[in-house]
Amino acid sequence: MNMIKLNDVSKVIKGRRILSEINLEINQGDVVALVGPNGAGKSTLIDLLLDNKKVSSGTIEGQELIRNHNQTGVLYQQSYFTPHMQTYQIIELFRNLYSEPLSIEAIKSMTLFDETLMKTEADKLSGGQKRILDVALTLMGDPDFIILDEATTGMDTSTRKRFYELIQQLKSEGKTILFTSHYIEEVESLADRIVLLHKGEVIRDSTPRAIRSENMTKQVMLPVHFEYLLDELRPFSRHIKVDKQYMTIETLHIDQLINVLQHHQVSLQNIEISNESLLDSIFKAVEEDSHETV
């Protein structure tokens, strides 16, 4: 079921076009990663959804859902807590905003906070602890639609792991989630769809698997002492990088390249082969779009 729909949405600020004719649907139960380089328009798009900014043209359907704080939870990029208030006091303050808030025990389970942290002044928590508390406060009213803007910034490994577990639980409950992230592992493991913004335009709206499968490039790493083979490898390579220790070869012709190496009896122990990452694919899409618009 369609929850949010953007129809030809554009935003101009001080004569500069930030977003251009965005068409986007977010359906019930979708987990959508909004990605793109800095300045692509991600934060502006979120501001338009939240009605913090007005669209210059186009329409957004479903904003009545977003405006209802009982149905929508929003986590912004920056954490801020009132000085001198203990963690449990912040939690109680937020609990009073909802008719059916999460219990204290549910919040403690989400954050993994013990009694010591609950009695710590919230603004003195670590960066990761503040962010996981932010996430818990965002979920306080059990919202149906959740917007998370760079949620894991500042989280350590264990806190980020807990965040991933929470998102997987929310997915299993059928919650609808829109999130931004600069951590590609989050996008790969959590998102059902990736919406790639570049220069204010949606240039890709697809699944992580589909984006990965679009590019069959392999990366082959060899110790640099095999540099004498470069002339024979070059016809099967699209890009070659040589540093002090390794050669990194990008190829669309992995079979032919491996045949050359086997012909010269290069041991498989010396060869490392990997698929091009989703991160590489995304930035390649950005680069290709840049070339097309120049």
Image (spheres, grey):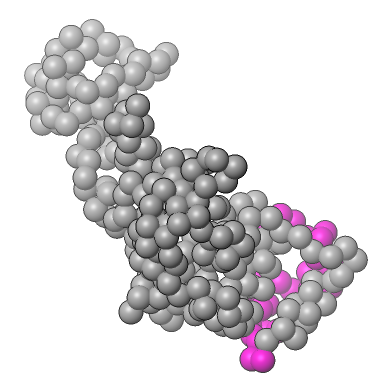
Say whether residue 12 is left or right of residue 213: right
Is residue 115 visible to the viewer in this orientation of the structure?
no
Q: Residue 75, relative to residue 62: is it above or below?
A: above
Q: Residue at x 61, y 52 (%)?
A: 153
Residue at the outermost right position: 84
Where on the picture, by quarter, is residue 243? top left
Residue at 27% x, 49% y: name it. Answer: 211
- For the record, the magenta segment spans 99-128
Q: Is residue 213 visible?
A: yes
x and y percentages locating residue 206 in the rendered image: 29, 56
Q: Residue at x 68, y 77 (%)?
A: 108
The residue lying toward the viewer, choosing from 122 and 80, is: 80
Quarter in which the N terminus is drawn: bottom left
Q: Position of residue 260 (x, y in %)?
A: 11, 20
Picture quadrant where residue 191 is located: bottom left
Relative to 251, is 111 above or below? below
In the image, residue 203 lies at what x, y percent? 33, 46
- Find residue 129 and report its horizontal and vertical position in percent: 70, 61
